[in-house]
Amino acid sequence: MVLLTVFTPTYNRAHTLPRTYESLREQDCKDFIWLIVDDGSTDETANLVKRWQKEEKGFEIQYIYKENGGMHTAHNTAYENIHTELNVCIDSDDKMASGAVSKIKQTWEKVRGKEYAGLIALDTDFSGNLIGKGFPSGMQETTLSGYYAAGGSGDKKLIYRTDVIKSVPPYPVFPGEKYVGLVYKYTLVDQKYKLFVLNDVICEVEYQADGSTGTMWKQYLNNPCGFAFLRKVAMQYPTSKKRMIRDCIHYCSSSQIARNKYYIQESPRKLLTVLCTPLGWVLTAVVRKKAKENG
């Protein structure tokens, strides 16, 4: 059986997806499947993929088209259709680093059977600059939340065991909204498993102006139920008191934007939510102002 599924959620990225494809063609190890989940694209994505499927490249390309629902729904669809031992997400504007599949395979063969949820590795930008911080010297295992709680920063590449990532609930879907943070499933996995540290670069990333990172203020305004849900989960599994207070303020703000009058009763930290409500209104005003400024 093939070891790894590289899955790529995509939406109108026909102009960047070819570089993802070329980075996979250049891998020295072809022990993977490329699963593309097309989240309702209206550009040339489907035609590109059809052409690539006919080319000789050494790996299988699977393609699923679905109605547009947002990144988290594309991840749900991917997990429903992945059957390899491991999986990793490489976004449609990113590239898999040279030799990445070999590094994943060699590292996993050393730690398979030790009950890790998978591997955690590094991202760089296209110029080779590390995204955020690296791993502390001597760190061999961690959870994702534990890494950040210890002072880590920046996106990291997560290679999960498929059975583990499927063992936690899928991302919820809220009517009229198209965003739930991917960290939801990762947080649940963190409660049961650790990740083995692969201290090497697996992905090269480029953040797009119209991507979720570049449009976050609008995301807050347009997807309040999804954000409130995520903050509620974060308060259930806090990594520090400071972080819990911050999450509670965001929970209050998102709940206010969603016009949920029951948010205090629904909070896992009811007293803290009462205390943070005024700051939530302040944040709500900031969100509306920033979203308007960013068009």
Image (tube, rainbow, N blue to C red):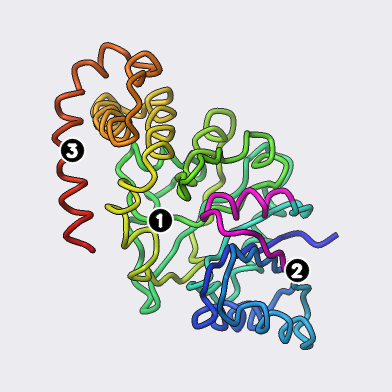
On the rendered structure, is 232 left or right of 40?
left
**Label 3 belongs to which residue?**
283
Q: Secondary structure at mark 2?
A: strand
**SS type, badge 3:** helix
Q: Mark 3 belongs to which amino acid?
A: Leu
Estimate the x, y position of residue 138 in percent, counting from the top left.
43, 47
Measured Cα–Cα span from mark 1 to mark 2: 26 Å
Q: In the rendered structure, does residue 174 fall within the stretch colored magenta? A: no
As rendered, which of 2 and 228 lies closer to the eye?
228
Residue at image point 46% right, 60% down:
122
User: Magenta residues?
Assistant: 62-80
Q: Residues within 10 Å of mark 2 (few under 14, many from 20)?
A: some
Amino acid type at circle 2 is Gln
Task: State which mark lies toward you, 1 or 2.
Answer: 2
Residue drawn at x 50%, y 57% as measured from the top left: 157
Label 1's element? Answer: loop
**Mark 1: amino acid:** Asp
Say which of marks 3 and 2 sits in front: 3
Name the disc covering residue 155, or none.
1
How far is mark 1 from mark 3, CA to CA?
Answer: 25 Å
Q: Residues within 10 Å of mark 3 (few under 14, many from 20)?
A: some
- Name which quarter of the figure residue 102 lies in: bottom right
Q: Are marks 3 and 2 in contact (CB under 8 Å)?
A: no
Q: Residue at label 2?
A: 62
Q: Are marks 1 and 3 in contact (CB under 8 Å)?
A: no
Which one is earlier in the sequence, the residue at label 1 or at label 2? 2
Closer to the camera in the image, 228 or 142: 228
Q: Residue at left 52%, top 34%?
A: 190
